[in-house]
Image (tube, helix red, strand yellow):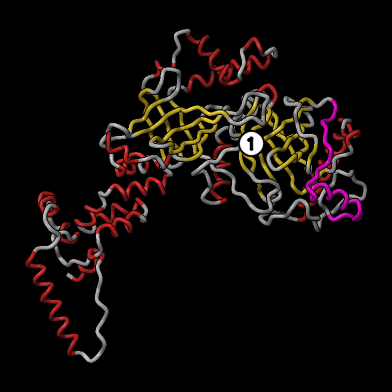
Amino acid sequence: MAVCARLCGVGPSRGCRRRQQRRGPAETAAADSEPDTDPEEERIEAGAAVLCGAESSRSAGPSPPPRCSLLELPPELLVEIFASLPGTDLPSLAQVCTKFRRILHTDTIWRRRCREEYGVCENLRKLEITGVSCRDVYAKLLHRYRHILGLWQPDIGPYGGLLNVVVDGLFIIGWMYLPPHDPHVDDPMRFKPLFRIHLMERKSATVECMYGHRGPHNGHIQIVKKDEFSTKCNQTDHHRMSGGRQEEFRTWLREEWGRTLEDIFHEHMQELILMKFIYTSQYDNCLTYRRIYLPPSHPDDLIRPGLFKGTYGSHGLEIVMLSFHGKRARATKITGDPNIPAGQQTVEIDLMHRIQLPDVENLRNFNELSRIVLEVRERVRLEQQQQEEDGPEDGEGHGRQSPREPQHGSAQPSAGPPAEKGREPEDGGAMAAEEQPGKCGQGQPFVLPGGVSSRNEDYPRTCRMCFYGTGLIAGHGFTSPERTPGVFILFDKDRFGFIWLELKSFSLYSRVQATFRNADAPSPQAFEEMLKNIQSLTS
């Protein structure tokens, strides 16, 4: 009895969980329809209370405070208390006693859990028309499919992609995010639905494929394992068009590139486009997705990390993820191409080697920029050689150091180009002048050197600061990959660029202006592990 009293405050009543565990299913169902206590038990408890009172009056000490049970609270107060608890705790609470179980059928509780945990703001009272309760929405839709909410990368060979699964009203929708049409890197992202899950007229959730142009149709979702799930279309005939593959290709080309094949005069670009259509169309009935996280941020980061759209020559616009790792920053491809597939680190920035660009007139000379960058590369090589001779050292660096601060303890050649950044210089006045543009935020004039090609001529004409970096290049099929020197140019908080020295090419990157829920990494270690996983899939 003492155990039962501590559990639910009513003793060994018919609603007690301890007694229910000893009953069969039929006895439990019969007990649920009866009162929580019977008159005989109430009489016994009342007698016990009188005896306790008599004993207390005989004792010399003060009487203990009266015990209070949750069951003595009015039902409307219990509804408020239960509605403030996480939805995952409520099934356990329902096992305490019959009264709790009855109260937990109140839709007000589940309506609040849907709103606070999943952001469902629609008027859920409309569900009463279809006979679906808020409890059904929470248990059979939102809670059941909670593991697929967030950002994912589809396994489409070298091309990758970006899928965002969100709660949208009374639906869970998987939106595929697409870069804007080439070369308009500053335009907003495009997106289209790939699947949706809803609970409207049935008691079980319905999965529908949204691919194609004939409306929603039957689909299936399987959660393969932690951080991985797959989708399958059960009616692929909805993906086909009456005009055959030619009509499907023309429609895909307008959606993907915003133009027709006749508008694309570059023969190599036409081949790349046709290759992508043939390859990706093989995945229109079944896809596997792997979770990706947004990079963690730190106050000392050069700019806020995140997703960016970037220009990649004939491959069009691609999505990269900029992240900071101590003394280095990396741009990892979320979407890719046959040369550098998704998951690879397209650009790496050495935050310890800042480059001071020459004036605009000298910057127009590509040979001058090349000389500066190659001298910095040689300096980096000598420093790495010196570190190897001195002993192993963590190249990433766990402590963060602002690139604007002078670095201490590094050897600096007496004859060096003005490209050297943030080291402790002998010429303090020259370094102060070098640091001034970045610190004041006014920037310095910028122009692309002659002979450097760019998909977008509408690039910023001022920059804040520049750093030495390397870019990854490779042949078709990711053959003979190598890192080549280049220049990372920070334009503002939302845009940066990279000059590929060997390719004489310039890529402009612009931030993806979108808010993503359920996309933060649980820890920095989890983010690093995610980067390794997506890179290993295409290595």
Please state which of residues 382 and 460 is positioned toward the viewer in this rendering.
460
Q: Secondary structure at mark 1?
A: strand
524 displayed left or right of 54: right
Q: Is residue 27 magenta?
A: no
Residue at 46% across / 31% down in the picture? 288
516 displayed left or right of 440: left
Seen from this angle, which residue lies furthest top? 243
Q: Position of residue 496 (x, y in %)?
A: 72, 38
Q: Which residues are magenta?
A: 424-450
For label 1, count other residues whose C-alpha is less than 10 Å away and answer few (under 14), some (14-19) or many (20+): many
Q: Is residue 437 magenta?
A: yes
Please state which of residues 393 and 369 is positioned toward the viewer in this rendering.
369
Residue at 83% across / 25% down in the picture? 451
Q: Where is the C terminus found, in terms of image quarters? A: top right
508 displayed left or right of 244: right
* Residue of label 1: 308
- Residue type, mark 1 in image: Phe
Residue at 89% across / 43% down in the picture? 417
Q: Position of residue 77 (x, y in %)?
A: 29, 60
Q: Position of residue 67 (x, y in %)?
A: 25, 74
- In this view, 336 is above or below 531: above
Residue 480 figure quarter: top right
35 displayed left or right of 499: left
